Image (cartoon, coloured by chain):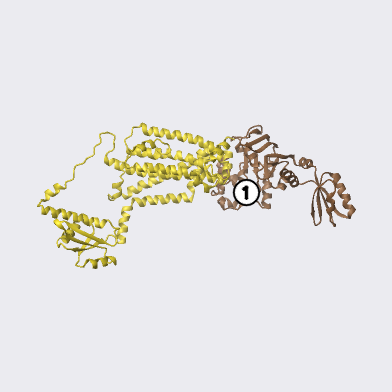
Chain colours: A brown, B yellow
Amino acid sequence: MALEVQQVTKRFGDFTAVDQLSLRVEQGTMYGFLGANGAGKTTTFRMILGLLTPTEGNISWNGRTISYETSPLIGYLPEERGLYPKMKVLDQLIFLGQLRGMKKSAAKSAALHWLDRFEVPQNTNKKVEELSKGNQQKIQVIAALLHNPQLLILDEPFSGLDPVNVEMLKKAIVDFRNSGATILFSSHRMDHVEELCEQLSIIHHGKQLVSGKLRDVKRSFGKQNVRIRADFPLLELESIEGVTTAHHSLEGAVFQVEDEQVAHRLLQAALLKGPIRQFEIEEPSLQDIFIAKVGDENA
Amino acid sequence: MREFWIIFKQSFITKAKTKSFFITTLIMVAGIFLFANLPSIMDKVGQMMGSDEDDHVLVVDESGVLFDRLDEQLQLNEQGISLELTEDSQDQLSEKVQSEEIEAFMELSFGAEQTIQASYTTGSLVDQFLPSALQDALQNIQTQVKADQLSLSGEQVSELFAPIQFEKHNISDTAKSEEELNQARVLVYVLMFVIYFAVIIYSSMIATEVATEKSSRVMEILISSVSPVKHMFAKVLGIGSLGIAQILVYAVSGFLAYKLSSKGEDHELSAFFSLENLQVSTLVYAVVFFLLGYFLYATLAALLGSLVSRTEDVQQMIMPMSLLIVAAFIIAATGLGNPELGYLKIASFIPFFAPLVMFLRVGMLDLPLWEPLLSIGIMIVTIFILGWFGAKVYRGGVLMYGPSRSLKDLKKAIQLGKE
């Protein structure tokens, strides 16, 4: 029960949108897909959904290829709002539920249940265009979850939502994972991916720069952050060998270092200058990794 | 098949439930009733506005006899013209006309050879009816005067003006008689209009629908559960059925309006447009050609609609298609007077013109059966080709976003559809 993408390449004429992409999402796990705009995320999703055929490579789910027969088992949330602006919320959800193979009555009760859970029952009979962006996004998410899919593909699920609603949505998605769904989602927000995903990929210009388990990705990044807080300026410490970058603030500085040896050298150098109030070796954040990888690629 | 019906129902019901659709239908029905009762309404309005008052003309009669005879003649004709003899000079009268005190005046005299000379002066020549009624009346008087002069008797005069017997015969059994042809012309003209408007309205509705689904990106969700081809045909059929339903509403209300308005008296409308000797075959052909024309253009419209990504660009994209329909209508309309023109025959086998032109010919002429059948066959084949081609374009077109506004994007869409 896993989604498997093997060595997939997609070319449009001379342009390579996705280049040799591989990933495997086990059942009951979440996979994060990170990339800047135009990195090839949407193309990959479209290939997984069967809307586009890969130029090379294979995509399978539970050993089957994904086709219109499997579509009732798949939930898809497109990046941009994909709803009829003039249709009423409930009618729309029933229609989309029916398209995913639900009976009308089942679709209706599921829609009402989710509207209630997302705290928007008052919007049941409003037209989509009358709703705020965040509320539209909720409807969009309901449309993807309504039919209890086993494979969820979410393209930027949290965009346009305030923190309270993001939490509400996260919880719904985590519940889905816990009940055994396979989830693939993309985001610009590193913190969401860091919090939710067991595995991730960073892609850029169609190439997979980084992929694997979150822990392994961080470990193999090879760099750590050293946070030092002191009452005196730390500018000189930048010149110590093995320090790659440094961010200074009023209370101290964060240095990115190549390994722990460098961290210790930093500590000694700092202590020579005076008393320090805090010293900490941190794991690199996904943000650091993303900027380092994608930034390098751009440079 | 299940998804097909869901999309079909959705495009039918959502559209039928919109306010604009409901209001348009209502206005059209009201319009039909209004049109059917137009003559009696016009009478009523005329009475209310007091425009049925007699036209008043001042007459300067130099001959001394013409005024009485003209007055008599006009009374006889009951044309609502009243005359008044006056002694005023031409200048005085001209001034009165200028100051709009009177509408018109006329000077009558006998010229050489006892020929009536009349000069009609008015402030505006917009009204053509009044002077021509006067002219006709004077012509009659002239005839009588001349007959008296030549001492011809009443019989001799009527013999002189006896109309010739001119009958038109047609030796083909199935050919339409003069009367039938006139009625057929009206019926064909009306139905041609219906087909023309229906095709133009519903096909642009399809293009707009498809473009709306694309621009609202709901398309991406739709085609992840239904194949684009299924979606396209469900859409075309859904809107098509909606169109048929709407036209049926119009037809029923038209029939009711006709029945109600022609119940009391025989007035102009029923004389002009009679349902009594309605040709059933013409109606059947109208339905057939409407359906074929619709599917032909709707498939094309869906194809074009799938190429644009914003609804604002739809009109521009379907412009060539609209021109094609307009051209078909113009060709057909020029043939109303003479449906046997050579270019009509050719046009009636060109698929995009056929729905209107072949319908005109089959409605007006006595064609061998193979001609309409061949034309229908050609259209069906074209619809299939367009459907097949449209499906190819559609598959890629619906995934294509960006500033696509020209037909060049066809190639891109087909390319994308293959991938």
Q: Amino acid at mark 1?
A: Lys
Question: Residue at 38% of width from left, 33% of height from top?
Answer: B373
The residue singled out by tag 1 in the image is A138
Return the x and y of residue A226 as percentages of the image width and height.
82, 49
Is residue B207 shown to the viewer in this render?
yes
Return the x and y of residue B165 as percentages of the image width and height.
19, 42
Please name whichever residue, A207 or B208, is drawn nearer the observer in this view of the structure.
Answer: A207
Residue A246 relative to residue A73: left or right: right
Residue B291 relative to residue B95: left or right: right
Return the x and y of residue A6 as percentages of the image width and height.
68, 34
Please name whichever residue, B406 or B274, is drawn nearer the observer in this view of the structure.
Answer: B406
Return the x and y of residue B366 as percentages of the image width and height.
31, 35
Question: Residue at 61% of width from left, 52% of height from top?
Answer: A133
Residue A63 relative to residue B343: left or right: right
Task: Tell me: residue A129, above or below residue B386.
Answer: below
Question: Residue at 32% of width from left, 55% of height from top?
Answer: B41
Task: Give me the chain letter of mark 1.
Answer: A
Residue B66 relative to residue A15: left or right: left
